Image (cartoon, rainbow, N blue to C red):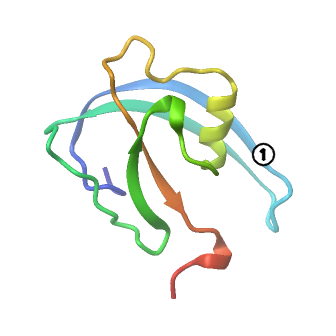
Amino acid sequence: MEETGLVIEKIEFLTVTNNLFLQEPKPSHYVNIFVRGFVADPLQLPKNLEPNKCGGWDWYDWNNLPKPLFGPLEVMARSGFDPLAHAEAIKVGTCTYYSDSVLPK
């Protein structure tokens, strides 16, 4: 994947979220499509290929996600949707995104 350098396979559609960011300095509307995939080599580790946007990648259990979450992921989690239903015991990868005020120089 372009943001992690991971080679993934068995990609499948999960769900879509509708996200309004009306309180932002530049109000916006995003439709986010979530997919699930599996790393082709279980020994692969994610790389931070966008260090100007992302503080790093980590793996988390779905029931123990960090706070705060990326807005669309939080919408999906609060909806009760379980992306791991009918899947092996896998972890969720998430990036710590920088806000505009804390982007590295």
Residue 34, image x, y percentages: 50, 33
Q: Amino acid at mark 1?
A: Leu
Indicate the quadrant where residue 80 lies: top right
Residue 65, image x, y percentages: 53, 40
Position of 11 compared to 35: left or right?
left
Residue 82, image x, y percentages: 53, 20
Q: Residues within 10 Å of mark 1 (few under 14, many from 20)?
A: some
In depth, the one of 97 and 66 nearer the eye is 66
Residue in the image at 16% along x and 36% along y: 40
Residue that protrudes farthest toward the bottom in the picture: 105
Position of 55 compared to 6: left or right?
right
Disc 1 is placed on an element classified as: strand
- All told, the count of numbered labels is 1
Residue in the image at 24% along x and 49% along y: 6
Position of 67 compared to 44: left or right?
right
Residue that protrudes farthest toward the right in the picture: 23
Residue in the image at 67% along x and 77% along y: 101
Establish if 67 lies above or below 90.
below
Establish if 94 lies above or below 96.
above
Residue 105, image x, y percentages: 51, 88
Position of 81 compared to 2: left or right?
right
In depth, the one of 24 and 44 nearer the eye is 44
Residue that protrudes farthest toward the top in the picture: 86
Residue that protrudes farthest toward the front in the picture: 64
Indicate the quadrant where residue 8 lies: top left
Residue in the image at 78% along x and 45% along y: 20
* Residue bearing mark 1: 20
Indicate the quadrant where residue 98 lies: bottom right
